[in-house]
Amino acid sequence: MKKWILMICLVLVAAIVSACSGGGSSSSSQSTGNDKTETSTKPSSESTEASDEYANYPEKPIEFIVQYGAGGATDLVYRPVLQRMEKELGGTIVVQNITEGGGIQGAKKLADAKPDGYTAGVLSAGQTVMAPLFREVPVGLEDYEIVGSVGAYLYGIIAPKDAPYDDFEGFLSYVKENSGHLVASTIPSNVYEIFYTWLRNEHGVEFSTIPFDSATDTSMAVQNGSADFSVGLTSVDNSRIENGDIKFIAPLGDLRWPVAPDVPTLQEQGYDDVMVATILGIGLPKGTPEPIVKKWEDALKATLEDPEIVELLQSLSTEPSFKTGKDFEDYLLNLDQSFKTMVGK
């Protein structure tokens, strides 16, 4: 009898152990299933949600502010670029020219616009880096989301065709010998003043200036003898140089002029602190969502990789130069330091 009781107890214990073991397996399987369910229904990341939110951008026309006159050099550069960018963005871009205040009013309107991606505009070194050196301005680099760069204007020293020198060292000697008796044509608060201030401070020379409203006028003053020298611009002076109407002395930026490829830049000649340049780009109001900024950057990059656009910009004497938003910002900050060094600030 005792044996039977013992056997029954052993059977019951085995059954209980088996049941407990089976229950544990069932619980483990359910937990794994729940984990899988939680993983599959986990919300997407914030960046993915943001990208999805702007997947249909743009859904209406975009206003693009050009802070220079219609038909001017900058306007002519941007219109074909923007027309090509419309294909990349999949929307319409409408140009608005705002010329008041030397371009500062247009720059401020861009900075003050609603940061929804439907207002963009020209972002240039002239307004964000150079202008603050000579006067108070209501905007700065910190007021924009920087999309990227479009191209660079090339500046250089020009002189009358009968000037008694042909290179920068000859020019410098002539200016020193005639200090106080020469006249340069200029556009106030422009890159001209950067170079002229450096020339005065670094080499101790004096000369007077005649102000004009455009690069065409400053160049003509050199050609007709009203000015002894000036800062030239490729878009204005290429043909004059080719025709022998004026002399080209040296590039003031970091690129040689295509019309005079054998003439080295001042940096190549050992003047490392000389950097006179204006690079053009595109900006959006500060706070514009990152996915929209990225769409603009990608569209700009694709546009400037188009051989037809490159050829067209070069025909307008603008050197195509794509830089990402970050690289363009770094370039402008470095240019700011160069300008401050040149003018002693």
Image (tube, rainbow, N blue to C red):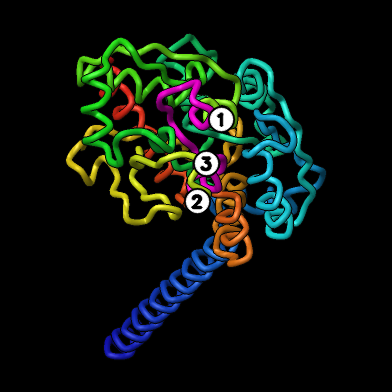
Q: Residue 298: give x, y in percent of width and height.
A: 57, 56
Q: Residue 266: give x, y in percent of width and height.
A: 26, 40
* Residue positioned 28% across, 15% down in the render: 345
Give me the C-alpha separation between circle 3 and circle 2.
9 Å
Toward the right, the furthest residue is 60
Q: Amino acid at mark 1?
A: Met
Label 3: state its secondary structure.
helix
Q: Which residue is mark 3?
A: 237
User: Is residue 236 magenta-colored?
Assistant: yes
Measured along the vertical axis of the image, is residue 125 above or below residue 94? above
- State if disc 3 and disc 1 touch (CB < 8 Å): no
Measured along the vertical axis of the image, is residue 278 above or below residue 44? above
- State if disc 2 and disc 3 touch (CB < 8 Å): no
In which quadrant of the rendered view does residue 258 lie?
bottom left
Q: Nearer the viewer, residue 1 or 67?
A: 67
Q: Which residue is mark 1?
A: 220
Res 29 visible: yes
Label 1: state its secondary structure.
helix
Label 2: state its secondary structure.
helix
Q: Amino acid at mark 3?
A: Asp
Q: Which residues are magenta?
A: 222-241
